[in-house]
Structure formats: structure tokens, C-alpha cells
Image: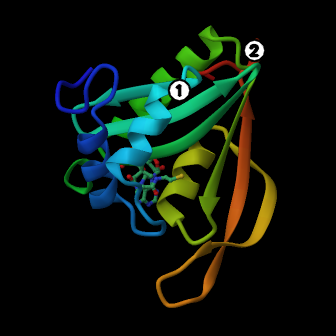
């Protein structure tokens, strides 16, 4: 686990990394990260230049934010932290993982599909854009059950 992002999460470092990485969505503030990390449902996996933050509620995991610093993308970092997240989520009893992603976020859609996520829903006009338009959100999910665990 990386020191600057912190074993239990450094809200300012996470917010700074996210603001460098996010293009299709508004980044969160350090306060937003602190509030999420304070909650006992939170699950954070991180490496020096990438993190995945989500929460576990009973048998459902939700990925809330995932980012790799632009200078370190396409080196497998997000794949590694996603695998750690899925393993930890399964260890805490999750059997399904959910997330939302902007329909225009080509990189994230390719990334999640490569890792076994399928579209499970659509939220029309979910994300507001700076120009006043709105972008659809795709809901994606994958199972974490036996025979379809985090390594498959
Ligand atoms: C999506 C994101 C986290 C991927 O991080 P990464 O560390 O570059 O991902 P990896 O190197 O592990 O990529 C694994 C695979 O995902 C796919 N992928 C990743 N980035 C891609 C891109 N820009 N275009 C197309 N496919 C991409 C590829 O299949 C890639 O495998 P390959 O490099 O062998 O072709 C990164 O692009 C990012 O931080 N984006 C901005 C934040 C964001 O959109 N987060 C998701 C919000 S839900």
C-alpha cells in the first residue's frame, strides 16, 4: 500500500489523483473522500499511482471511484488494484459487484468489460456536463461467486 495514498486512505492525496485522472466526471473533494473512508462499509485498495474505493453492503460491493494517474496509465495498475478490491470484497462476503460509468468513458468501459463486467442497466442523462448537457450512465455488474471469482 502506498504511503501518500495511505493504508487507510489519505483524502487529500486521493482527491488530487482523482482530479488529474477524471475527464468524464466531476472529481470529489478531500472532504468527500474523508466522509466515505470514515464509514465502516468503505473498502479502499491502492498502489502508488492508482486506487479503487468502494463500499460493501451485506453481499453487494459497489465501486465508487477508480483512477490511475494519467502518467502511469496502460501499465496494468488499475487491473491490479481492481483484483485486490474484488478479492477483499469477496473476503467480506460480497457476491456481486456494481458500478456506474459514463457512457462516453471509452477507457473505463473497455477496462471493465475486460474484467468481466456486463451492462445491467442505463440511467438516461445521469451525469451533468460543464456545457449544460447530460451524459447517460451505464450500470455494470459482475458476479463474485464460486467459479466466477475475482481471478476469473
Ligand atoms: C479506466 C482507468 C482506471 C484504467 O487504468 P489503467 O491503469 O490505465 O488500466 P490498465 O493498464 O490496468 O488497463 C487494463 C485494460 O483496460 C483497457 N483500457 C485501459 N485504458 C484504456 C483506454 N484508454 N482505451 C481503451 N482501453 C483501455 C485495456 O483493455 C487495458 O488492457 P491493455 O493495456 O492490455 O490493452 C484509467 O483510464 C483512468 O483512471 N481513467 C479516468 C478515471 C475513470 O474513468 N475511472 C472509472 C470511473 S467509473
What SS does tag 2 mark?
Answer: loop
Most extreme residue toward the right is 121
> What is the number of the mark on residue 147?
2
Q: Is residue 92 above or below residue 14?
A: above
The response on whether ligand 1 sits within 8 Å of label 1 is: no
Please tell me which residue is depicted at 58% across the width and 77% down the height of the picture: 128
| Secondary structure beneath label 1 | loop
* Near-viewer residue (81 or 55): 55
Q: Locate residue 116, reporting x and y percent.
A: 66, 38
- Asked which colour scheme the image uses, the reply is rainbow
Q: How packed is label 2: few (under 14 Cα within 10 Å), some, or many (20 or more)? A: few
Disc number for residue 39: 1
Quarter of the picture containing the C terminus is top right
Residue at left 37%, top 46%?
Answer: 31
- Residue at 25% across / 32% down in the picture? 5
Residue 102 is left or right of residue 58, and the answer is left
**Pointers 1 and 2 in contact (CB under 8 A)?**
no
Observer able to see residue 55: yes
Q: Percent x, y for residue 30? A: 33, 47
Q: Which residue appears at 31% of the width and 59% of the height?
A: 19
146 with respect to 135 (left or right): right
Amino acid at each position: 500500500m502506498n504511503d501518500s495514498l495511505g493504508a487507510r486512505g489519505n483524502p487529500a492525496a486521493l482527491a488530487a489523483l482523482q482530479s488529474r485522472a477524471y475527464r468524464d466526471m466531476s472529481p470529489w473533494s478531500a472532504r468527500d473522500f474523508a466522509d466515505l473512508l470514515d464509514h465502516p462499509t468503505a473498502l479502499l485498495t491502492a498502489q502508488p499511482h492508482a486506487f479503487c474505493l468502494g463500499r460493501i453492503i451485506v453481499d453487494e460491493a459497489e465501486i465508487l471511484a477508480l483512477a490511475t494517474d494519467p502518467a502511469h496509465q496502460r501499465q496494468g495498475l488499475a487491473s491490479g488494484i481492481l483484483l485486490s478490491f474484488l478479492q477483499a470484497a469477496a473476503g467480506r462476503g460480497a457476491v456481486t459487484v456494481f458500478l456506474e460509468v459514463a457512457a462516453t468513458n471509452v477507457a473505463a468501459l473497455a477496462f471493465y468489460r475486460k474484467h468481466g463486467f456486463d451492462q445491467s442497466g442505463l440511467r438516461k442523462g445521469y451525469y451533468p456536463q460543464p456545457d449544460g448537457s447530460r451524459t447517460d450512465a451505464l450500470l455494470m455488474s459482475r458476479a463474485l461467486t464460486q467459479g466466477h471469482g475475482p481471478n476469473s
